[in-house]
Image (cartoon, rainbow, N blue to C red):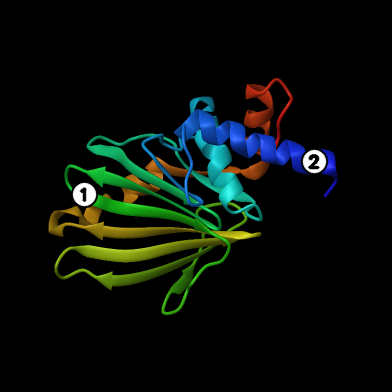
Amino acid sequence: MSRTRLGRRLALIAAVALLAFGAVGCGRMESQAAPTCVPKGADTLALVAQSVPTAAKVPCIANYPAGWHFASLSVRNGRTQFTLDSDRAGISAVKVTLEPRCQTDGATEIPSDEPDTRRFERIISVVQGFQAIRSYSFDGGCITYRFDFDRLGRALVNEVSVAIDFMDRTAVDELVRQRSGGQLHL
């Protein structure tokens, strides 16, 4: 990596971190800034993308179905996780995680609903609520949904599928370039 490119990358990380979080400590950042799929979420999406620089895709919140809201975001080197709460499925009903690779032990591969990904499903429990893990494997990364619904929430999985989307890394890079007037990029 050239010195200029490394300098730009470090400047991007610093600028985005300051904009989105204010202060950074111990390589881990937590925020109430939601990683939305619209330009308003560009700063947070840039941090998510940088947490797993090999990932070709980045998870983001496309919309909030009725009763769902963003709860938290944790970004660190090699991993990002955000959670969604639901008035029907419960607190931290869904945890969405981006990591370099998937852990698919005990999961079944099924046809994917996301382009250029492999999808794996593992049902953990349907007795005392609904608990399951859905993983999407793709070039350089893995996005996992961990469902932990209250007993009444089993039918809400489809709402999560509508709420969460994936952005290609190139689209996040374009947002960063637009927001910085072409001065910064991933």
Q: Quadrant of residue 122?
A: bottom left
Q: Quadrant of residue 55?
A: bottom right
Residue in the picture at 32% in, 53% down: 94
- The residue to which callout 2 is attached is 5
Position in image of residue 145 (x %, y %) = 39, 57
What is the residue that sits farthest to the right in this orientation? 2
Residue in the picture at 14% in, 54% down: 152
What's the mark number on residue 130? Answer: none
Q: Residues within 10 Å of mark 1 (few under 14, many from 20)?
A: some
Which is nearer the N-term, disc 1 or disc 2? 2
Relative horizontal placement of residue 102, taking residue 106 as reference (left or right): right
The local secondary structure at tag 2 comes to helix
Position in image of residue 26 (x %, y %) = 48, 52
- The residue to which callout 1 is attached is 91
Distance from disc 1 to disc 2, alpha carbons, whole Å, reads: 42 Å
Q: Quadrant of the C terminus?
A: top right
